[in-house]
């Protein structure tokens, strides 16, 4: 490849801390960096589509990627937002013929390192923790889907929206003078898809919370001014 991933210290640190290569020794990590493919996707483009053969697993290096799933009835659901250092497409390691269960779309210009199925399996022969990490990653996704289903059945929509905002702030929050900025481009439609409700409901709810001083809303920008107030809503203590 034109760019030498193995020579970039920042990328090395991201890969070392990723869920895919956690606890992998330096020798195998260097081998992984040597064979990794650096792939860039412009805003709105796709790393892969739901149903495509799962040929590669990825660790995001820069930008933001959302994982989107189309349900059998045609509804689009945003499962999660990926931030640098996070792994997606891990099914390529376990069962590539099953296809990707979701679409990976760049919400801003994004770069990731990709490893093919055979590359990952050869690396896993030298470092079995890669296989364990992948299974733990898949298990985490299953638990996440179960929690989402439970929330849809048992929680008020305001609770779900508050939980989504708090989760995103925990993953990519940045302290500012105005409060905790969710440091990614985030639309009301994204929040609606992640919380299982409508764009109208999200817009109305966020407007109410802004008037109450809990949030500050800008174009594709959310600042949590009173996170504890959102925690109370998320825990149904209001």
Image (cartoon, rainbow, N blue to C red):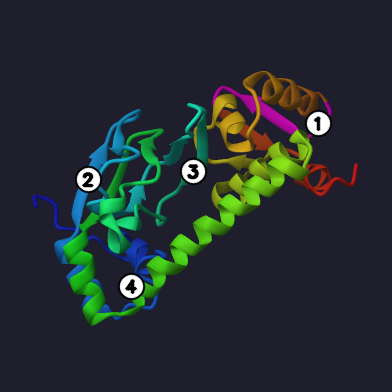
Place of residue 224 in the rendered image (x, y in percent of width and height, measured from the top left): 70, 39
- Which residue lies under the disc numbered 2? 39
Instruction: Find numbered disc 1 in the image and state the secondary structure of the residue it sits on.
Output: loop
- Which residue lies under the disc numbered 3? 81
- Which residue lies under the disc numbered 4? 130
The crowd level at tag 2 (other Cα within 10 Å; few <14, some 14-19, many 20+) is some
Magenta residues span: 212-220
Instruction: Find numbered disc 3 in the image and state the secondary structure of the residue it sits on.
Output: strand
Q: Which mark is residue 193?
A: none
Work out whether residue 17 can be spotted. Answer: no
Place of residue 52 in the rendered image (x, y in percent of width and height, measured from the top left): 27, 41
Labelled pair 3, 4 in contact (Cβ < 8 Å):
no
The crowd level at tag 4 (other Cα within 10 Å; few <14, some 14-19, many 20+) is many
Residue drawn at x 32%, y 60% as measured from the top left: 10
Place of residue 131 in the rendered image (x, y in percent of width and height, measured from the top left): 34, 72
Task: Find the residue positioned furthest to the front.
Answer: 72
Asked if residue 22 is positioned above or below residue 106 in the image, the reply reads below
Q: CA distance from mark 1 to mark 2?
A: 41 Å
Q: Is residue 161 left or right of residue 126?
A: right
What is the quadrant of residue 176 in the picture? top right
Labelled pair 1, 3 in contact (Cβ < 8 Å):
no
Q: Earlier in the sequence, mark 1 or mark 4?
A: 4
Work out whether residue 56 can be spotted. Answer: yes
Residue drawn at x 77%, y 42% as measured from the top left: 155
Q: CA distance from mark 3 to mark 4?
A: 23 Å
- Which residue lies under the disc numbered 1? 213
Labelled pair 1, 4 in contact (Cβ < 8 Å):
no
């Amino acid at each position: 490849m034109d760019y030498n991933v193995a020579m970039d210290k920042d990328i090395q640190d991201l890969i070392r801390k990723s869920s895919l290569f956690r606890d992998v020794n330096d020798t195998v990590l260097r081998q992984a960096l040597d064979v990794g493919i650096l792939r860039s996707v412009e805003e709105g483009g796709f790393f892969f589509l739901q149903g495509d053969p799962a040929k590669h697993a990825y660790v995001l290096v820069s930008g933001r990627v959302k994982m989107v799933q189309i349900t059998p009835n045609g509804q689009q659901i945003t499962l999660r937002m990926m931030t640098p250092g996070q792994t997606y497409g891990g099914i390529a390691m376990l069962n590539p013929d099953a296809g990707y269960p979701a679409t990976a779309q760049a919400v801003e210009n994004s770069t990731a390192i990709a490893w093919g199925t055979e590359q990952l399996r050869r690396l896993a022969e030298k470092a079995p923790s890669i296989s364990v990490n992948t299974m733990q990653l898949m298990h985490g996704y299953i638990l996440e889907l179960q929690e989402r289903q439970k929330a849809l059945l048992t929680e008020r929509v305001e609770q779900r929206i508050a939980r989504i905002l708090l989760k995103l702030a925990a993953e990519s929050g940045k302290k500012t003078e105005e409060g905790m900025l969710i440091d990614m481009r985030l639309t009301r439609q994204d929040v609606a898809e992640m919380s299982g409700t409508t764009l109208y409901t999200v817009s109305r709810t966020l407007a109410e919370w802004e008037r109450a001083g809990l949030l500050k809303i800008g174009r594709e920008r959310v600042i949590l001014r009173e996170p504890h107030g959102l925690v109370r809503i998320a825990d149904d203590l209001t």
